[in-house]
Amino acid sequence: MSPEMWLLMITWGLVIPYLILCPPQLLFVRRKLKASRDRKMLASCSLKDKWQVPRKGSSNNNSMTSIPVSPAGGGGNQTAPSALPRWIIPKSSPVIVAVVNRKSGGQLGASTARMLHQLLHPAQIFDLADIPDVAAILRSFTGAFKLLVCGGDGTVSWAIDAATRCGIKPPMAILPLGTGNDLSRTLGWGGGFGISDVSEDAVRDVLVNMHSRSVTQPLDRWRLTITPKNGAPVATKTMLNYFSIGVDAEISLKFHRERQDYPERFSSQTKNVVKYAMLGFEAAFDGRALDGSVHMSCEGKPLDLMDGWKGAIISNVPFYHGGKNFWGESSDIHDHYGPARIDDGQLEVMGLAGTFHIGLCNINVDSALRVGQGRTMTVDIDDDCAVQVDGEPFPQPPCTIVFTKIDQYPMLRVDAAQAGARWWKWW
């Protein structure tokens, strides 16, 4: 046997036992390598002091200070938009700008802000309690940047509206806090961080995915034009996720009112779930049917609402009720409707037989009844009822509601081919 072969055998004789006997050490080294690469990646998307625009009267950039978020979540003193420093970012070095809703998910917002401060330049992080003007935040940056919104679907909607109004539309990712978060689930960012999930590693993974493992995903935005039948002024609302009417909205409205009147009864997530279940059980026996008081049409054609229906959903995203696919997979349901998408300019209309039907949909035993799919929707309401838009419930007098597409916003979706494979967890 040649000396080279002997050397190869000896080498493998040493390496293979090490791999078998010492996997913890190997895993530790791999994680250290990953952390080192992630830090370099985040450094490349952090602000550089030389990009800051000198204020009038300043002799150099070093005399300027940034406006960081309060890492402890103290808040109370709002920063004037005019006090924000200005930054010019080169196109070759896109950075991440993070806005945090401290009120989302209990104390999760404050914890997330603290983690972000350990990973990014302080001038990239903004607390909406200190600087609620998202448009002013966006206008303080010129050049290439991506926006990370830390909060629930309501915070995301608020940020998108502000960005659209000021004409600046940076690609947006979501770090979901709290529960629900159906838009975040749709885009692959998850259903929400819990108290035990908010760690520096978890926040770093979101930033790394956002920087290099995400793709741009257009999101349809919809306008609801509400024309009351009593002659009151016309109102408008913007919808990203869904609209619902009937039993589900009634339960949400009762829950919302009780939480406002008796906040001490809703001090934990477990209590909230129990209370919601109790309201759903009550609605199973006294919920009103929609037929006769609600009429719907899709692209000008009337939709057939079956007798006894107690609820209906008009949805822009595949998920509802915290990650449940009420529309179902088109491959499993043989009809002429296509899959639910967030960028096809279409809305999906579904019917709900009652709270028991909703419960079956929640445990993936059944799906909602498909009624229609189209580019324009009209809902005609003849009697007082409850409705909700993107999780915000409110009582609605008789009216006509028209759904029309406004535009699209560039969201960031986690690329399943890269993040889903998770090879970066090991190397």
Image (cartoon, grey):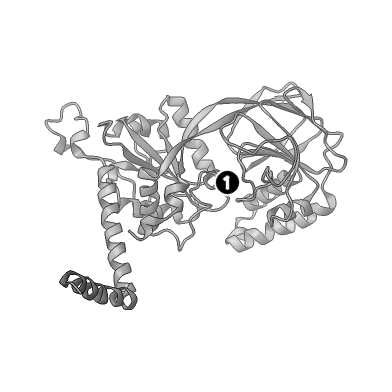
Q: Quadrant of residue 67?
A: top left
In the image, 15: left or right of 186? left
Q: Which residue lies furthest to the front in this view?
A: 1
Position of residue 354 measured from the top left corner of the image (x, y, whole percent): 79, 49
Q: Does 299 appear above or below 372?
A: above
Q: In which quarter of the image is the N terminus?
A: bottom left
Q: Kindly tell me whether residue 39 is visible in this rendering.
A: yes
In the image, 44: left or right of 415? left
Closer-to-camera residue (156/301): 301
Q: What residue type is labelled 1?
A: Asp
Closer-to-camera residue (329/165): 329
Position of residue 303 measured from the top left corner of the image (x, y, whole percent): 80, 31
What residue is rendered at 85% in x and 37% in y?
A: 291
Q: Kindly tell me whether residue 126 is visible in this rendering.
A: no
Q: Mark 1 points at which residue?
A: 182
Q: Quadrant of residue 401?
A: top right
Q: Does 265 appear above or below 119?
A: below
What residue is rendered at 79% in x and 55% in y?
A: 282
Position of residue 391 measured from the top left corner of the image (x, y, whole percent): 62, 43
In the image, 268: left or right of 396? left
Label 1 residue SS = helix
Q: Does 400 appear above or below 358?
A: above
Closer-to-camera residue (8/110): 8
Q: Quadrant of the C terminus?
A: bottom left
Number of residues whose C-alpha sits closer than 10 Å to that of mark 1, classed few (under 14), some (14–19) or many (20 or more): many
Q: Quadrant of residue 245?
A: top right
Q: Does 279 appear above or below 159?
A: below
What residue is rendered at 37% in x and 37% in y?
A: 146
